[in-house]
Image (cartoon, rainbow, N blue to C red):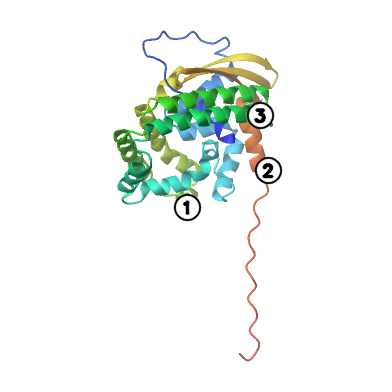
Amino acid sequence: MSWLRPLPLLLLPLLGACKREPAPLPGANAEPAAAVHQLAVHLRGNDLVGYARAMVTADQYARLETAWREDRSRWPLTELPLSDELPALLAALSRPGAEKELQQQFDAQVAGQGAGIRQAARSLGMFGVQYLRNQGGYSPEQRAHYVQLVTALSEWAAAAPLAERGHAQAAIAELTAAVRQSGLKGGEDLHAAGMEASLRRLGPVLAALKKVLAGYGLPLDTSLDELRTGLVNQQGELARVRIQYPLGAQQIDTTASLVRRQGHWYLQRTQDEVERLLAAPAAPVPETPATAETPPGR
């Protein structure tokens, strides 16, 4: 369930505005903790370029731009849930008449199905938790964190007005307008724009998505404001940071490993994944069949 990994920084909702400001976590001002908090600051400002630059070293960033141009990478979009579907989603939201078509699909398949959606959300949540508890390949820390995420998101989805037509109509209008404004109509446009320009143009799309989710009771900006980090321990070039944030009715409490490179702190998991991506050999270019020589005299 690799789609869960970016959720700690991308899906961080609601604490009541009337609650007291929580006390900082111990070690909040330490460099590793501040580095994680800065990622949330970039997302709060819809600054996807700043977020990407803060996730990797300058050399890695340049190499990732090259890999994007060569169609070997779509990082950091691959950190998103269902990232493989993003080009098709951009195409669906940007084409003429998308509002009417998507509303018709919603009316035919989703509208008025609130009870079924609530049951499906609960069932998927239970299935996800059981999957995580029984599936190998996760550290105990990862497993505990992902179980918290699935539980919280399941509870939110069961309570959200996902089947209400008015919410869907507003959401479709907001997202289609933002995607059209970006000028990104699918995979070809992402390739042509390149990594940094694509991320810059997707910033307003992220803002629109946040607005839509806020309408469904998931105000991400409020939660990004309330994300707290603190230092658990630091040994040389390695550190562990505690991260707390509200997610629906739940308070998520987890830790992340960081590594120091070139004087800056980065998430260890991201560094490992980016290095594997950059080390992968480029796909071979298909050979063009040689044109047969025309026999003399023809």
Q: Quadrant of residue 114?
A: top left
**Under tag 2, what secondary structure?**
helix
- Give the Cα distance between marks 1 and 3: 39 Å
Is the Cβ of the residue at disc 3 closer than 8 Å to that at disc 2? no
x then y, percent, for residue 36: 55, 22
* Residue assigned mark 3: 134
Q: Residue at x 47, y 44 (%)?
A: 86
Is the Cβ of the residue at disc 2 closer than 8 Å to that at disc 1? no
**Under tag 1, what secondary structure?**
helix
Where's the C terminus, which quadrant?
bottom right
**Label 3, residues with CA under 10 Å away: few <14, some 14-19, many ≥20:** few
Taking the image as shown, residue 110 lies to the left or right of residue 121, namely left
- The kind of residue on which mark 1 rests is Glu
* Residue assigned mark 1: 188
- Give the Cα distance between marks 2 and 1: 24 Å
Q: Quadrant of residue 102?
A: top left
x then y, percent, for residue 285: 63, 59
Q: Residue at x 64, y 26 (%)?
A: 133
x then y, percent, for residue 108: 35, 44
**Label 2, residues with CA under 10 Å away: few <14, some 14-19, many ≥20:** few
In the displayed image of the protein, which residue is found farthest to the right? 236
Q: Residue at x 52, y 34 (%)?
A: 52
Question: Mark 3 or 2 closer to N-term?
Answer: 3
Question: Mark 2 or 1 closer to N-term?
Answer: 1
x then y, percent, for residue 224: 45, 22
**Label 1, residues with CA under 10 Å away: few <14, some 14-19, many ≥20:** few
- The kind of residue on which mark 3 rests is Asn
* Residue assigned mark 2: 279
Note whether residue 262 is visible.
no
Question: Mark 1 or 3 closer to N-term?
Answer: 3
Give the mark toward the camera: 1 or 3.
3
